[in-house]
Image (cartoon, rainbow, N blue to C red):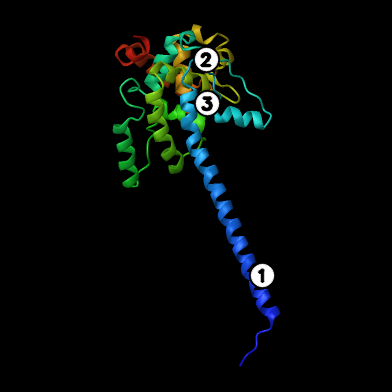
Amino acid sequence: MDIVPETRGEEEDVSSSRSRGWGQALRRRWRQIALVAIVIVLLPYVLIVLYAPSFIHPISTLMLRDLLLLRGYDRQWVSFEDISPHLVQSVMMSEDGQFCIHDGVDWIQMRGVVYDALEGESTRGASTIPMQTAKNLFLWNGRSFIRKGMELPLALVSDVIWSKQRMMELYLNVAEWGPGIYGAEAAARHHFGVPAAKLTRRQAALLAVSLPNPFERNAGKPGRGLRRLASLIERRAGRSGEYIKCLYE
């Protein structure tokens, strides 16, 4: 008959107790991590509601980054009524011609992108203005399926909560037009020395076509290719009456 010393039994009890303690601590930590993740995912939807009133002037994630890195930035908020219609027309025709029609996502364009991806072809951009606004306010730059998956529902919800005019106002006040240059007012003054309300059709077209890459496309010092693109958008903007009724009716 084996005799187990009492000290051995006590050691096993202590070891078992420690294991349970570690397990409980780990479970608590995972619950905390899960709670933080849920808050991060749901916070943008709360902010969408809070950003609906016109007197709220939110900043973008890139502005927040510039603040945290002590770089500073230039953004002078202007209401929709104080932005030149030329810029509104040019941005719509350059970035999202179906803005007044879709529900935040251009599903026809999106299906084309998915099809190209499944076929192994290079994908073209299908971001709408609501999608870009959601990305600028709540997410990050860079192409990834994770970001796109978060962007789509945010665009759909914001299109329900915000009017089309409020959506465009937000977009034109948070869009980046150069290093530390955010919003139409700062961009107009930086590149052309005029307020956003006084932008000409040509200046507006140059700002619109520089949006996809404002670090390489300088609206104030356009190269030949940028001027050619601006001429195309300028012509489209001049024929955009039927496309912008949701903003000026």
Residue at far bottom of view:
1
Question: In front of the other: label 2 or label 3?
Answer: 2
Question: In front of the other: label 3 or label 1?
Answer: 1
Q: CA distance from mark 2 to mark 3?
A: 28 Å
Front position in the image: 134 or 29? 29
- Give whichever of discs 2 and 1 has the lower sequence position: 1
Residue 156, position as x, y percentages in the image:
37, 30
Front position in the image: 148 or 217? 148
Residue identified by numbered label 2: 55
Residue 240 visible in the shown view = no
State whether residue 123 is above or below residue 91: below
Residue identified by numbered label 1: 14
Q: Secondary structure at mark 3?
A: loop
Residue identified by numbered label 3: 214
Q: Secondary structure at mark 2?
A: loop
Local crowd size for mark 1, using a 10 Å CA cut-off: few (<14), some (14–19), many (≥20): few
Q: Secondary structure at mark 1?
A: helix
